[in-house]
Image (cartoon, grey):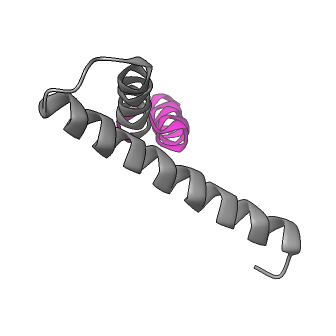
Amino acid sequence: MNNTKWFWFAIGYQTVLAYLAALVVFQIGTLFEGGGFGIGTVAALIVIIFFIYLLFRPNKEEKKSTVKANAGRAA
């Protein structure tokens, strides 16, 4: 990465992402095994909603290129 700042950012990002994925798997697994519904389960559901949003959010670049293409056709 040729920069210490970006190196530590990448390490931190991957660590946080792995922790969140493990939290979701553990909490949902515990819920299915008969464990109680607690604050960890709520946090896991919030993380799942956030991951789903990231998967299906609209692409800003695609909108810009579509607007430019439509403007070119209208002219």
Placement of the N terminus among the 4 image quadrants: bottom right
Instruction: Establish if 61 lies above or below 1.
Output: above
Task: State the residue at coordinates (42%, 27%).
Answer: 40
Q: Magenta includes 57?
A: yes
Task: State the residue at coordinates (58%, 51%).
Answer: 16
Task: State the residue at coordinates (35%, 39%).
Answer: 24
Find residue 5 and report its horizontal and vertical position in percent. 86, 66
Instruction: Establish if 23 lies above or below 35.
Output: below
Q: Magenta includes 70?
A: yes
Q: Residue furthest front?
A: 35
Find residue 43 and report its horizontal and vertical position in percent. 45, 25
Find residue 13 and report its horizontal and vertical position in percent. 63, 56
Quarter of image, res 56: top left
Magenta range is 55-75
Q: Which residue lies furthest to the left in this view?
A: 33
Assign the magenta stretch its main secondary structure.
helix
Quarter of image, res 10: bottom right
Question: 59 and 53: which one is in front?
Answer: 53
Task: State the residue at coordinates (49%, 34%).
Answer: 63
Question: 54 and 11: which one is in front?
Answer: 11
Quarter of image, res 27: top left
